[in-house]
Image (cartoon, rainbow, N blue to C red):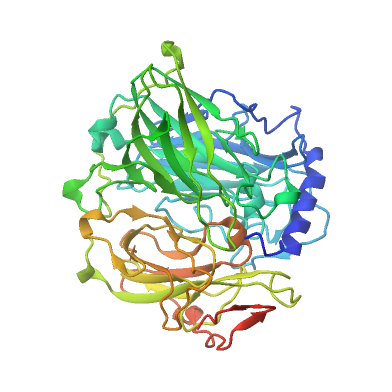
């Protein structure tokens, strides 16, 4: 959101990282190497499980590039940066994360846990790090996918044990840093990578035998800032890259993919951006090509009904929010095509949203060299279920809830961030910018199925994401999606409120989602906007899932006081009241 000043605290932490980065204790000179502009795309390094276990060691480093931008990276002892982790349903990921940054000065420390909640270090500093295993339906307990109280300080190691459910859908997931208030800068700097749960060729036979490419899209601060045109929509808020090949403003020299003429391929795309929304379109001589989509956000298409699992959804473009994934089949250009390019279309993020202009990402270059073609995807041995989300309908709904995104632009030093304050709030509760000790805003039980209506009471889009589970989108702006057209997601965009769009009758832009708590996920975790600048600013909250049959302590989910009833006046602009 360009009109809000950055958090003073976040800026201070980032300055600390930049100051510390050149001192990183590493024998090699560049711990986070990046390819040159216009390079041929290489797949990330691959790490595969064996005998049901994938044992991985990540070392965490930062450095500063030639343009003064801080880079963040997870690197194996063998020097592989951001490898793709390949797992099978039922496998265990045994991962040791070691923070090799130098110790931070005793400035800006924040205690994020007490003795009863600590999972690693008690205090957060600029070089603190952790990992989130995005989209995976795994435990939120300590040493699994817990992000609120898990901190790895400089010089420390932390051991993760991620048990992949036997019925985990075969598809794409990803990992990234998730330390609240500094997640945005770490993900922008490259602290991310892809995860594949194997077996999609077993469910979707159309992909079997096709060469597969893993494309990880990222964003980062501009290499060439244009200060005189900062608010012009053609100037992006962030640069982007494809498998770390930069495509910087203003020249946008695309990365290169080599294909054989007319060949089909399976592209598996992760939008690992912190803030940038992508709307991908493949153009051959300016004509949009069909994308045969076989999975969104880690779930094969058609999984709303186990009988139709493997249904292909054909579109001419696909919107992928930050953290989203889309997997699709393409047919390469023929020799007569003069220009073949993958672009991201212009995104209308709202009157106060970021600038995400149209720009090229990849140019397809034809080749007869078979060595340039990636290896094919094959079916795996043994049964692949993948239909854990099927057969869900309205008769199973156990609760209805209403939440909303809200933000306040102000220079009042008493707001949580000294500038913009960001919230995601249950209707009837007081908006609170997130903090680590926050009690759960929602309590539910394992086995529940809930319908949540999530409104956007702001003038920019937000990207709703919840950890540990998936949801089915059943309506957008109160317009129902037919049951046979619904898909499963873990991240989805909520439309923005037009500048003069509030009618006073409560008709806010919204999505309605069916939350699936039927999996074996018990504990406390978070939901938030996955524009990480907003998440860092407070747009996050906790949910507590109690064991099936009740029990546990409901007192932590105490109701808050009613929300404010008067609008906040900001000069000539009035932000509408959240209640």
Q: Residue at x 36, y 19 (%)?
A: 334
| Viewer-side residue, 178 vs 241 | 241
> Where residue 42 sits in the image (x, y, percent)?
52, 25
Position of residue 578 in the picture relative to residue 551 (left or right)? right
**Residue at horizontal 79%, vertical 52%?**
15
- Of residues 64 and 53, the one drawn nearer to the viewer in this rendering: 64
From this view, report whether residue 53 is shown above or below residue 506: above
Kindly give the residue lying farthest to the top in the view shown. 369
Q: Nearer the viewer, residue 493 or 58?
A: 493
Considering only vertical position in the picture, is 518 above or below 357?
A: below
The image quadrant that residue 489 belongs to is: bottom left
Q: Is residue 448 visible?
A: no
Residue located 58% across and 88% down the image: 566
Q: Nearer the viewer, residue 118 or 220?
A: 220
347 is higher (above) or lower (below) than 372? below
**Relative side of 357 to 554, left or right:** right
Q: Is residue 55 above or below residue 127?
A: above
x, y percentage for residue 260?
Answer: 39, 17
């Amino acid at each position: 959101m360009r009109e809000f000043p950055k958090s003073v605290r976040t800026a201070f932490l980032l300055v600390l990282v930049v100051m510390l980065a050149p001192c990183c204790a590493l024998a090699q000179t560049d711990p986070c190497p990046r390819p040159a502009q216009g390079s041929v795309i290489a797949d990330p390094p691959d790490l595969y499980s064996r005998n049901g276990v994938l044992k991985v060691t990540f070392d965490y480093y930062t450095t500063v590039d030639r343009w003064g931008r801080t880079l963040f990276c997870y690197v194996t002892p063998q020097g592989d940066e951001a490898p793709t982790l390949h797992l099978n349903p039922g496998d265990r990921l045994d991962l040791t994360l070691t923070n090799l940054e130098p110790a931070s000065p005793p400035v800006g420390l924040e205690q994020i846990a007490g003795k009863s909640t600590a999972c690693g270090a008690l205090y957060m500093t600029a070089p603190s790090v952790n990992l989130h295993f995005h989209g995976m339906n795994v435990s939120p307990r300590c040493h699994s996918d817990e992000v609120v109280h898990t901190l790895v300080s400089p010089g420390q190691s932390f051991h993760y044990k991620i048990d992949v459910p036997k019925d985990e859908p075969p598809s794409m997931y990803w990992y990234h840093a998730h330390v609240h208030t500094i997640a945005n800068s770490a993900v922008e700097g490259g602290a991310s990578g892809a995860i594949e749960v194997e077996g999609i060729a077993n469910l979707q036979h159309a992909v079997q035998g096709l060469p597969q490419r893993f494309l990880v899209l990222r964003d980062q601060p501009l290499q060439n800032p244009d200060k005189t045109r900062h608010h012009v929509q053609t100037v992006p808020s962030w640069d982007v890259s494809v498998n770390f090949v930069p495509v910087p403003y203003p020249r946008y020299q695309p990365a290169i993919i080599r294909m054989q003429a007319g060949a089909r391929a399976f592209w598996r795309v992760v939008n690992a951006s912190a803030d940038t929304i992508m709307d991908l379109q493949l153009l051959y001589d300016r004509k949009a090509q069909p994308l045969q989509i076989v999975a969104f956000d880690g779930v094969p298409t058609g999984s709303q009904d186990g009988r139709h699992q493997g249904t292909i959804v054909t579109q001419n473009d696909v919107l992928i929010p930050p953290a989203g994934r889309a997997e699709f089949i393409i047919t390469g250009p023929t020799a007569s095509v003069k220009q073949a390019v993958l672009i991201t279309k212009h995104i209308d993020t709202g009157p106060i949203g970021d600038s995400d202009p149209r720009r090229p990402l990849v140019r397809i270059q034809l080749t007869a060299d078979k060595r340039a073609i990636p290896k094919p995807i094959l079916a795996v041995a043994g049964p692949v279920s993948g239909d854990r989300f099927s057969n869900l309908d309205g008769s199973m709904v156990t609760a209805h809830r209403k939440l909303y995104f809200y933000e306040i632009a102000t220079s009042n030093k008493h707001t949580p961030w000294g500038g913009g304050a960001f919230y995601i709030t249950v209707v009837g509760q007081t908006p609170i910018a997130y903090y680590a000790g926050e009690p759960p805003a929602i309590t539910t039980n394992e086995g529940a199925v809930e319908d949540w209506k999530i409104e956007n009471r702001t003038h920019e889009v937000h990207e709703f994401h919840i950890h540990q589970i998936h949801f089915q989108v059943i309506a957008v702006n109160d317009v129902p999606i037919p049951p046979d057209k619904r898909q499963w997601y873990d991240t989805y965009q909520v439309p923005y409120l037009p500048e003069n769009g509030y009618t006073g009758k409560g008709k806010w832009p919204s999505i309605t989602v069916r939350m699936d708590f039927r999996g074996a996920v018990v504990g406390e975790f978070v939901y938030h906007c996955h524009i990480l600048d907003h998440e860092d600013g407070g747009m996050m909250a906790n949910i507590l899932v109690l064991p099936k049959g009740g029990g546990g302590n409901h007192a932590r989910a105490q109701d808050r006081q009613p929300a404010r009833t008067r609008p906040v006046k900001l000069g000539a602009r009035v932000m509408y009241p959240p209640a």
